[in-house]
């Protein structure tokens, strides 16, 4: 066994060292991957705006939307279900553009607030707010299954505080915008200062280090 180990060690010693270097193509793909989610949403919105011209006002709204979506069935097989879902949400907002909706947005003071708008105006909002608006449009027009349908949900514990959909969407929108705010030279300082006031410190993880916790699961 010692002879085998010595042979393996000798062979390993003769293997030339690999000196790491940054591959520009790999870097470009990393940047592209980081922007993929935002660009995908924008493409879906633009595609829905173009396809909205094919909506037939003579048909019932649900059939009207489904008919247009079916025109691109083969394209969605290639693009994936996430693209189809975003496209259909945006198309739904176009199909029932004047339906009133209430969505959570971040106001000028940085706080989340409910905004009462019509469906067509929600197309330009971030993903979570846009999808919530589309859901409200479907409920208002009797499309799909309304929230609360089917089996009755279990009663929440008396001590548990109710969380509204606006609060959930507001948090999701805040989370989506957290990284850009951290990278901003003005907002970064304000965030750090506020965290210090709350008794926390903000430290960036060492490159390559994996942070353990529920968010990393």
Image (cartoon, rainbow, N blue to C red):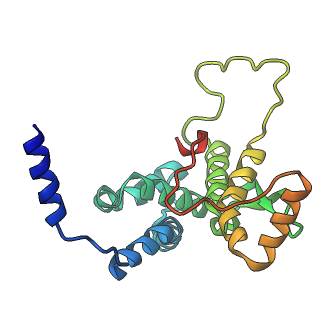
Q: Residue, x 61% and y 54% (percent of image)? A: 131
Q: In this picture, is 212 found above or below 194? A: above
Q: Is residue 52 visible?
A: no
Residue 118 percent coordinates (x, y): 74, 61
Snapshot quadrant of residue 173: bottom right
Q: In this picture, is 139 found above or below 53? A: above
Count of numbered tags: 0
Name the quarter where the N terminus is drawn: top left
Q: Residue, x 75% and y 53% (percent of image)? A: 170
Residue 42 percent coordinates (x, y): 53, 71
Q: Is residue 16 visible?
A: yes
Q: Residue, x 66% and y 51% (percent of image)? A: 132
Residue 65 percent coordinates (x, y): 48, 55
Residue lying at the far right of the rendered structure: 197
Left or right position of 124 against 42: right
Q: In this picture, is 24 found above or below 149? A: below
Residue 126 percent coordinates (x, y): 65, 63
Of residues 66 and 18, which is closer to you in this image? 18
């Amino acid at each position: 066994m010692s002879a085998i180990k010595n042979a393996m060690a000798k062979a390993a010693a003769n293997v030339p060292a690999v000196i790491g270097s940054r591959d520009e193509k790999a870097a470009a793909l990393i940047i592209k991957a980081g922007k993929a989610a935002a660009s995908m949403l924008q493409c879906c919105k633009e595609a829905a705006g173009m396809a909205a011209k094919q909506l037939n006002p003579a048909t019932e709204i649900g059939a009207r939307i489904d008919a247009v979506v079916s025109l691109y069935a083969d394209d969605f097989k290639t693009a994936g279900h996430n693209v189809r879902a975003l496209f259909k949400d945006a198309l739904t907002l176009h199909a029932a553009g004047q339906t009133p909706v209430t969505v959570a947005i971040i106001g000028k003071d940085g706080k989340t607030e409910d905004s009462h708008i019509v469906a067509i105006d929600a197309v330009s909002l971030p993903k979570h707010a846009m999808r919530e608006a589309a859901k409200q449009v479907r409920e208002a027009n009797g499309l799909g299954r309304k929230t609360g349908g089917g089996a009755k949900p279990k009663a929440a514990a008396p001590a548990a505080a109710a969380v509204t959909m606006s609060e959930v969407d507001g948090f999701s929108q805040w989370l989506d915008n957290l990284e850009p705010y951290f990278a901003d030279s003005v907002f970064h300082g304000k965030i750090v200062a506020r965290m210090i006031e709350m008794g926390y410190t903000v430290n960036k993880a060492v490159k390559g280090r994996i942070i353990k916790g529920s968010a990393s699961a």
